[in-house]
Image (spheres, grey):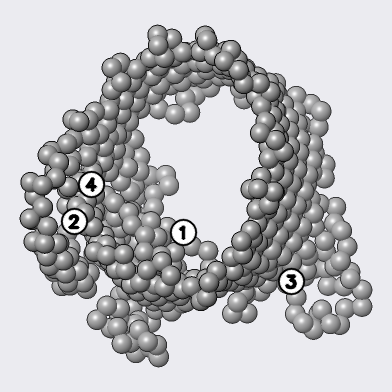
Amino acid sequence: MSSGLVYISMQSPCFRFGSMLLVSLWFITTSVCAQNLESIGKGDALTISGGVNVSQVFYAANGIEDRRDPYNYFLSGNLNLSLYGWSVPVSFSYSNQNASFQQPFNQYGMSPTYKWVTAHLGYRSMTFSKYTLNGHLFLGVGVELTPSDKVKIMAMYGQLQKAVELDTAEVGNLPAFKRMGGGAKVTLGGADHSVDFSFFKASDDPNSVKSNVADIGLFAEDNLVLGLGVSTKIINNLTFKGEIAYSAISTNSQSEEVNADHIYNKFSFAFQPRASSSYYSAMNAAIQYQFKKYAFGVAYERVEPGYRTLGAYYFNNDLENIALTHTSRWLNQRLSISARGGLQRNNLNKTELNTMSRWSGSLSINYQVSPKITTNINYSNFSTVVNFRTPEQLYNQATPYDNLDTLNYQQISQNAALGANFLLGNSTERAQNLNCNFAYQQSAEEQGGEAQNTGSKYYNFNSSYSISFVPSALVVSLSGNVNVSQAVDTQNLIYGPSLSARKSLGDKKASLTGALSYNVSEANNKLNSSVLNLRIGAGYVLREKHQFNLNVTAINRHTPHSTTQQQFREFVAELGYNFNFSSR
């Protein structure tokens, strides 16, 4: 289990940065408390609410080796304390599976709130923007201040990643340096016009890992991101939103210091340019005009190759998007239409060997035919063009079949879906509902302008019927699904029915559920596998605060052509308890 203690060198840039940030937060929160002390005694007295959930999972298998641990438990909960307007929510999660995670699974944190002040303590996550800090978990402290409708301040500092030593004996071991980070965002303005400034700084501690990870290409990193966002109403019904960010990142914070011809030289107190430093930008903008029944807009995004931030887990880069958007509502809001079309491309710096561009379009229509019938239609088309040849090869070819050893093909993907819902009856005795859905997907390729013998098709049809017997509190559902996928030399078919029922007992305090499904999988008209799945569950609510649940699942799988296990069974049982309380 991860400890809440974090060691930081007093000489490190992160310590100096964190100290300044925490001192600023202390002055801000002290001022806030002083301004609101007079309200103590005027609000509600102490109230406590929250809940605790305990879940135990048991597993057994017959015919194969166990595919999961035979026993696991999960404990989670939340607690909210309120005293004269102060709100202090606390949450935690704990499990015996924490040992299998290199980064913490067991987490503890709280976010107390008083009027326009919210603090984040422990394991929390915050978001400044898409390109700076975006939902990254940290162990530390944060604050959100909204003193007025036109001012909002956000700030945080803490540990983004714990140190993990290199262990070659452990499968899947991913060593990592301890990473500290912090930042702030200030938003000024109201709903019609606003501007925000943000920065985020993160650094790895090169001394936090004792093993020689440089041999596997792992080095301590350093990152500083600056962001600017604007939102404004140009004229009535015409709005504009835009954001731009610059990220400076050193892939080896121990490399040689240099003087870079870049604006970040002016921020050497927060980021020291080094031989391993790179500088990237990202931006997006959207403009939209809203008519009475419909709206048109243009959206643009450009993210330079290599752009990333240590404040986000994953980031798409080397892309440029431009799209036209449209939404409208007709026939007294019963018909709604949404459409989008545009172009996406990569290799913005022309440094890669291949370039890809993609046309994309989508259309969504929802129509309420009558109070008992609703329908929806969705369609999208994506066309990807990949070019992997020099201009000389392209211009000098005599036929489309010249230079086929280079790459020049177009991939087309189409998706379509239809859906309809029918309310067959709704009386005091019974209610019936029928739902039908169909989906189709196709992909194809062209090379040198000629269709290739590749691609695939996918069909899916599913339908469900449910009937509710109101007096007896019984709901029965019957459904079926068919999936067909076709490729060049193969055809896969999966189909099967399922039956489920739910019954409420004892003034709806107790419930019983059951479900039985059977699915068959075929490949080229030969049986591949059949799966019989049985689920039984029971629940009981005691005095509205205590909830008990028991769910048992039994699976029987038959694979006649398997060379190892042709038939095996698995059993999973889950016993859960949930307690909700409130002092009110």
- The reply, left or right, for residue 584 in relation to residue 36 is right
SS class, disc 3: strand
The x and y percentages for residue 107 are 27, 43
Are circles 3 and 4 on residues that touch, CB within 8 Å?
A: no
Distance between mark 4 and mark 1 Cα atoms: 26 Å
**In the rendered image, which residue does mark 4 sit on?**
110
Q: Tell me the quarter of the picture where residue 510 sits.
A: top left
Q: Residue at x 19, y 69 (%)?
A: 21
For label 4, the crowd category at 10 Å Cα-Cα, with few meaning under 14, some 14 to 19 and many 20 or more, is: many
222 or 172: nearer the viewer? 222
Asked whether the viewer can see residue 510, the reply is no
Element on which disc 4 rests: strand
Q: Amino acid at mark 3?
A: Asn
Residue in the picture at 53% in, 64% down: 316
- Looking at the image, is 340 positioned above or below residue 406? above
Marker disc for residue 387: 3
Label 1 vs label 2, nearer the camera: 1
The label nearer to you, 2 versus 4, is 4
Seen at 85% across and 67% down, the residue is 448
For marks 1 and 3 on the same chain, the one whose residue lies earlier in the sequence:
1
Residue that mark 2 sits on: 6
Q: Which residue is mark 1?
A: 314
Which residue occupies the foreground of this view, 354 or 154? 154
